[in-house]
Image (cartoon, rainbow, N blue to C red):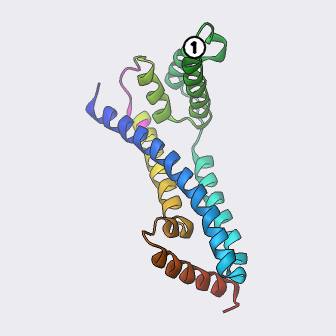
Amino acid sequence: MNPLIKKLIRDYNYLAETLEDVKAISSTAEGEFKSALIESDPDAAKALMPEVDNIIEHVNSIEEQIENISDPKFKKLFRKIAVKCHPDKLINLDETDTLLYKRMYGDLTFANKNHDWGMLLKLAMELNIDFGELNDTELENIIKNVDVLRLEIKKYENSMAYSWYIQNDENARTEYLAICANIFKKSMGTD
């Protein structure tokens, strides 16, 4: 396998897993951050809600920008993977394998919907399916998806809630929360 393709798929896998971790941390952080902000400064908390919604809208708009185009090679690989992990094929498997193949099929559906070569190749590698050489357009698609993953991770990690959550001690959290509250009040024009 081409070393560049191998690296891109490894990057994609790493970033996809990292994004899932960051989303989980962010979800916890947002809940705790909102509670702490409401407790410390209810007026500032009112301005928080639109900021979180704007971040989520931006991430969703990035996902919508990925074009789904007609690509015979993509569809051919999609079919090879679907044959191995389609829910109709999950007969006489133990529960662990059934869950694994259901996850793979969900990922496959996502890859098809978003024309995501990175996800498709990740699944092909997991199932030991040969996908041959990739052309420049296919490589560009993987690079684009890797960039989208990086951007999504940054969006979550750069949020105030996430930054507050990862503070090491309670004093740093309290100071950061006060700074955030002032920023929110200024954005509402109440400070």
Which residue is nearer to you in this view: 72 or 7? 7
- Residue at the image point whose x is 43% and y is 34% from the top: 138
Which residue is nearer to you in this view: 154 or 66? 154
Mark 1, residue position = 94
Horizontal arrangement in the rendering, residue 5 relative to residue 43 (left or right): left
The image quadrant that residue 12 belongs to is top left
In this view, which residue lies farthest toward the front? 170
In this view, which residue lies farthest toward the left? 3
- Residue at the image point whose x is 44% and y is 72% from the top: 169
| Residue 161, horizontal then vertical, whole percent | 56, 67
Judge whether 185 appears above or below 79 on screen: below
Callout 1: helix, strand or loop?
Answer: loop
Label 1 amino acid? Asp
Which residue is nearer to you in this view: 42 or 112? 42
Determine crowd level at label 1: few under 14, some 14-19, many 20+ residues with C-alpha closer than 10 A: few
| Residue 159, horizontal then vertical, whole percent | 54, 66
Residues shaded magenta: 131-137
| Residue 131, horizontal then vertical, whole percent | 41, 20
In this view, which residue lies farthest toward the bottom? 191
Name the quarter where the C terminus is drawn. bottom right
- Residue at the image point whose x is 40% and y is 41% from the top: 14
Judge whether 50 appears above or below 22 on screen: below
- Residue at the image point whose x is 58% and y is 52% from the top: 62
In this view, which residue lies farthest toward the top? 92
Judge whether 68 appears above or below 171 on screen: above
Name the dominant secondary structure of the magenta segment: loop
Horizontal arrangement in the rendering, residue 93 relative to residue 5 (left or right): right
| Residue 55, horizontal then vertical, whole percent | 61, 62
In magenta stretch: residue 159 = no
The image quadrant that residue 109 belongs to is top right
Horizontal arrangement in the rendering, residue 185 relative to residue 128 (left or right): right
Name the quarter where the N terminus is drawn. top left
